[in-house]
Image (tube, rainbow, N blue to C red):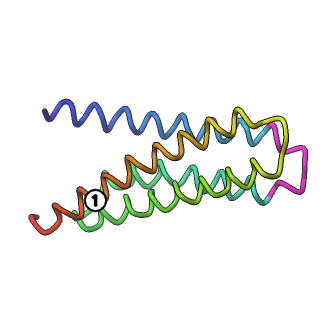
Amino acid sequence: MQNEKLKFKEDFVKRLVKFTVDIVRISRKLRGDSSLWSIIDQLIRAAGSIGANVVEAKSSSSKRDYLHFFEIALKSANETKYWLIVLKETVTGFDTDIDRLCQEADEISKVLAASVLTLKGKKDAF
C-alpha cells in the first residue's frame, strides 16, 4: 500500500513536469505574436507553479503547511485552465493542442482537489 502511494506521487510529479514542458513548448510556438506575451507569461507561471508547489510540499514542516502547498497548487491549476481558455479564444490553429492541455489541466485539478479534501478531512486527526 505504501509503495503504491509513493509510486502514485512520483508519477504525478512526472505528469506535472510533462504538463509544464508542454505548456512551454506551445508557448514558444505562440511567441511570434507580441499581443500574446502577457497571456503566455501568466500561463507559464501558473502551470509551473502547480508542480513547484506539489514538490515544495514534500519539505513541509507541518501537515497544515503541506495542505497549504496543495491548496496553492490547486489554485494555480485553476488559473492555468483560465489562461488556456483565453488562448483558445484568442488564437487559431492550435485548438487540438489547447484542448488537450485544458483536459490535462482539468484532470490535474481534480487530483489536487481530491487531495486537498482528503488532507482537510485528515488534518484534525494529526
Q: Dividing the picture into quarters, in which one does residue 62 lie?
A: bottom left
The residue depicted at 44 percent of the width and 58 percent of the height is 74
Residue beneath label 1, please? Answer: 117
Q: Dividing the picture into quarters, in which one does residue 23 lie?
A: top right
Q: Residue furthest left?
A: 125
- Mark 1, Cα crowd under 10 Å, few <14 / some 14-19 / many 20+, is few
Residue 31 magenta-highlighted: yes
The residue depicted at 67 percent of the width and 56 percent of the height is 83
Residue 98 magenta-highlighted: no
x and y percentages locating residue 36 in the rendered image: 83, 54
x and y percentages locating residue 61 in the rendered image: 25, 63
The residue depicted at 58 percent of the width and 50 percent of the height is 47
What amino acid is labelled 1 in the image? Leu
Q: Can you say whether 16 is above or below 38 in the image?
A: above
Q: Dividing the picture into quarters, in which one does residue 100 lie?
A: top right
x and y percentages locating residue 94 in the rendered image: 78, 36
Span of residues in magenta: 29-37
Quadrant for the C terminus, please.
Answer: bottom left
- 81 left or right of 42 in image: left
Q: Can you say whether 108 is above or below 15 in the image?
A: below
39 or 100, nearer to the observer:
100
Count how many numbered circles sit on residues in the image: 1
